[in-house]
């Protein structure tokens, strides 16, 4: 221990941790065992992880397994983390243990430290913050929660804005040509663009067709293809089962 470090202990022994860090021994071991690439876990993931800890504390309190005062402190601390107030306390690199245990324990230790300060007594990162949880469940759940939140907060608004811009652009083109509104859509359909497969220009299509993928265009042009493909999809599924 030096003026800039403190000693933390776990089942593997003791080690020095930065004096002002909110994390503990297991996070520090991860930092030392997995040399950083500079790629930390995304903000959305940290937020989702904290929200899971918040929910788990509430559930454990309702079950009577966790004292309500401890659960309340954990929940308050979790909301601080979810709000982005502690992002610098998550130093674990994205390249770590395959199950994400290091990130899970990073969250447990940070939240436990904050909760201990709120409560005025020690809150255990594993026995209380991580009660009834496993990295094998928490990490996949955090990924799903993060994706769902980003879908609702970023992707949906972006798609809505894109639709509005396309609609405004179509109206603008119609006005320039002095066309009535009922033919603006037809105008857009006459502006032929190239559909794309990955990076390659593929099938010619108009503006109204662009949201469809190439398969969608094929099905619209040749409606019978779906009936032909369905039995083949079943055959492929059988083949896939056979090679597992």
Image (tube, rainbow, N blue to C red):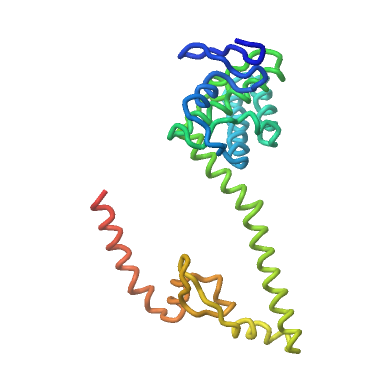
Q: Quadrant of the N terminus?
A: top right
Examine the image and state in which quarter residue 239 appears. Answer: bottom left
Above or below, 236 relative to 106: below
Residue at left offset 48%, top offset 29%: 34
**Number of residue marks:** 0
Q: Is residue 240 left or right of residue 163?
A: left
Above or below, 153 relative to 20: below
Q: Is residue 234 left or right of residue 194?
A: left
Above or below, 147 relative to 11: below
The image shows residue 188 at horizontal and vertical percentages of 63, 81
The image shows residue 87 at horizontal and vertical percentages of 65, 33
Q: Is residue 185 left or right of residue 213?
A: right
Q: Name the outermost residue toward the left.
A: 242
Residue at left offset 64%, top offset 85%: 187
The image shows residue 114 at horizontal and vertical percentages of 67, 22
Above or below, 164 relative to 221: above
Observer-nearest of 63 and 28: 28
Examine the image and state in which quarter residue 171 appears. Answer: bottom right
Examine the image and state in which quarter residue 63 appears. Answer: top right
Observer-nearest of 209 and 76: 209
The image shows residue 52 at horizontal and vertical percentages of 58, 34
Residue at left offset 67%, top offset 58%: 157
Residue at left offset 52%, top offset 11%: 14
């Amino acid at each position: 221990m030096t003026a800039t470090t403190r000693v933390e202990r776990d089942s593997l022994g003791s080690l020095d941790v930065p004096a002002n860090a909110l994390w503990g021994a297991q996070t520090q071991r991860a930092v030392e065992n997995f040399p950083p690439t500079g790629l930390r876990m995304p903000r959305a993931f940290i937020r989702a992880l904290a929200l899971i800890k918040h929910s788990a504390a509430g559930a454990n309190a309702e079950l009577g397994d966790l004292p309500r005062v401890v659960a309340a402190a954990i929940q308050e601390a979790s909301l601080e983390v979810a709000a982005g107030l502690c992002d610098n306390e998550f130093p674990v690199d994205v390249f770590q243990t395959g199950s994400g245990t290091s990130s899970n324990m990073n969250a447990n230790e940070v939240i436990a430290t904050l909760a201990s300060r709120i409560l005025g007594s020690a809150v255990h990162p594993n026995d209380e913050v991580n009660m009834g949880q496993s990295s094998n469940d928490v990490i996949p759940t955090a990924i799903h929660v993060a994706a769902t939140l980003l879908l609702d907060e970023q992707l949906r608004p972006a798609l809505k804005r894109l639709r509005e811009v396309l609609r405004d652009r179509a109206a603008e083109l119609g006005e320039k040509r002095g066309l009535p509104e009922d033919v603006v859509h037809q105008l857009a359909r006459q502006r032929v663009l190239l559909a794309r497969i990955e990076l390659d220009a593929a099938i010619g299509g108009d503006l109204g067709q662009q949201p469809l993928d190439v398969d969608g265009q094929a099905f619209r042009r040749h409606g019978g293809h779906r009936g032909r493909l369905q039995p083949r999809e079943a055959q492929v599924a059988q083949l896939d089962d056979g090679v597992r």
